[in-house]
Amino acid sequence: MSCFIVPKVLSGSDLQKALKKIGIKLSDIKKSYYANGKTLLCLKKRVKKRLDKSLFPSRDEEAEIKEIYEFCERYRYLINTERRAEIEATIGEIKALSGVEREIYGRAILGLKGSKEPSRLNLYFVKFGRSRIIDTEISSGDIVLISRGEPLKSDVTGTVSEVRKNFITVAFEEKPPKWVHGDGIRIDLYINDVTFKRMEENLHILQHATGVQRRMRNYALGIWELKEPKEQSFQAVTKLNDSQSEAVQKALGSEVFLVHGPPGTGKTSTLIELILQEVKRGNKVLATADSNTAVDNMLQRLARYDVSLVRIGHPARILYELEEFSIHAKYEKSLEAEAIKKGWEEIGVLVKEREQHSKPTQARARGMSHDRIMTLAARGKSMRGVSVATMQSMAKWIKLDRKIDSLIKNLRFEEEQVYKNIIENADVVLSTNGMIMSDMLKNFHFDVAVIDEGSQQIIPSTLIPIMHANRFIIAGDHKQLPPTVVSDSKELKESLFEKLIDQNPKNASMLRIQYRMHEKIMHFSNEQFYEGKLIADASVKRHTICDFELKEPKRSEAILGCEPLVFVDTKGVEAKEMLAQRSTSYENEKEAKIVSVLSEELLAMGMEPKDIGIISPYAAQVKRIKKLVETDERIIEVKTVDGFQGREKEVIIISFVRSNEDGKIGFLKDLRRLNVAITRAKRKLICIGDASTLIHDETYKAFLEYVKKEGKYVEWEESDEETATN
């Protein structure tokens, strides 16, 4: 198939005209591709037409245009599929579950009373509180739906600013209705459509990229081969180990680099040093992640150093203690802000004055233009039945309206200049990936983009910061959980980090010293997922819960004693799995009771609730365990594996749930899920499960054999529950 290029993006009648000039009909074209600001047109086989040689692309250019076009078309489809799936899942769950059930899953909060909070940063704040403890998956930055108990009948949405023990604060861009300050308020986690739109907008930029943007795109998508790193020496600002130093050295000398950070290895610490080194070299840095939490984590650490920082984003999505770094807070402190504020006040006065005059509506003006009305009013003439008084009143309205429009235009320009200056004067700009495509930031370009949480982002999200920098460094761990995807798309579940590290191992560096786990907890994951390359730092290598001043356990020393690694086997008791009602999620009543018994014992020994974490792969089991272990006085964190990624606790209890005669373990087969679950504990890991079911999978079989050899393997008995509670 012969293909030629039109050096513009053309379609429809414009394309038809361009083709006519070279003697080609639109019907002669078999397929069109659009990329790099050009149109590639491929002729049908039967068409025999001699074209000027200058119209034919090189083989590489043709392949690039086709690949980019097909990539963008494919991911537009996938983004839309994911958007629809998210909307359907959210609305479907609100319809299917009661408010109480949705609250147990952490996606709603009931029985709240709203109270007005002081406005700031041009936002309206409402604090929603109750006496009962709030335990929720809803967090700062989330979009929520506010209702009086029937969420699907409400259209009031806001952004979560703060979540505390007994209240949640929500920010509104427009003044909320008065009823939000009343009783019986319900808050539901909702959908953020803006993120999808911004990913689509970035795909258009990527599709027609030129210059350095094209180079970064082609590196990211594997069209061009990456250059190997050239290590650059540096004088460290922070304390680094050898593997962290090696990662920074290589990253400084690379256009594209990947920092592989297994659990507890100080990935973010390494990125902070890298950012500080880039600033020392005079480079402007864009520091990003998919989540506000990860961005604020970088900001908190960078704030300790003498570096000019600015955080881009909705003020409500930024931690309150970091608000001073927000671009909105910096704007309010600027010299120009007061004058601009007075300008808006003047506009308010003019708007009220304008309201005193007749607005030239279509009916009142009777077809006359604004200029015509002004002329007639100046001459003191009436026309088309409009009196002189009305004509002059409309003229005054038009004059004031024009003045208001002019003032608004000038003030907005002045505001934009202040924001622009703040960004230009910052050494490091911090933002979520999506916010980079906001009007405030999308026209800026940076020397380097440093992207955290890279293995947890879908590819279109990671490509946003990449399209805004001359170099990029991504940090992540593809051996942990992939991006969270609601639709069935396997493609979206593969991160750019994973793709690049598989294709370009020379452009990656793995951090090897871990500072979280006892070496026995670390060992299995190390051998199974990290080729045995991890080393437990001396500070954590042998630490256990016995380093704390705890009481003796009433229950078996084997489970709750000093031993850091324990497996509790339920095969000898009735502990069968079951499908939760109105759900596809599994639960296990017996395992939930065992978790409750052990957590109560740990608390009785003197462990703090905040130091205990409970994990289950299944949301239904999380719901069941929460009912047993949480009280109005205390909260023990109970989450799915996904909810615990990036987190750690002194003690972790895992409920594997699956127990059946067929040996089916469902999505436990995703071994990255196992890796995350068993690497959250610092001093003690207690796993609860039916060994006779789990051993049907080779990896779980190997894990159980490892626990038998190096840890404690205990068979649970019915009498154990009585012993613990007596």
Image (tube, helix red, strand yellow):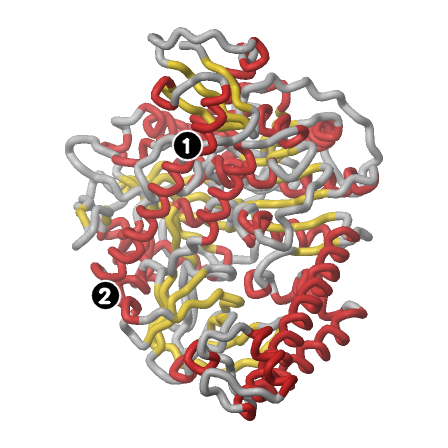
Taking 484 as reference, is 402 above or below it?
below
Q: Residues within 10 Å of mark 1 (few under 14, many from 20)?
A: few
Q: Which residue is mark 2?
A: 98
Q: Which residue is mark 1?
A: 73
Q: Does the rendering let one see residue 677? A: yes
Residue at the spot 55% in from the left edge and 54% down from the top edge? 292
Q: Tell me the quarter of the image containing the N terminus.
A: top left
In the image: residue 262, left or right of residue 538: left
Residue 549, quarter of the rendered image: bottom right
Q: Amino acid at mark 1?
A: Glu
Which dot marks residue 6? Answer: none
Q: Secondary structure at mark 1?
A: helix
Q: Quick one: 704 or 11, which is closer to the camera?
A: 11
Q: Quick one: 703 or 469, which is closer to the camera?
A: 469
Q: Amino acid at mark 2?
A: Ser
**Residue 58 % position (x, y):** 56, 11
Residue at the spot 64% in from the left edge and 36% down from the top edge? 537
**Residue 153 % position (x, y):** 28, 70
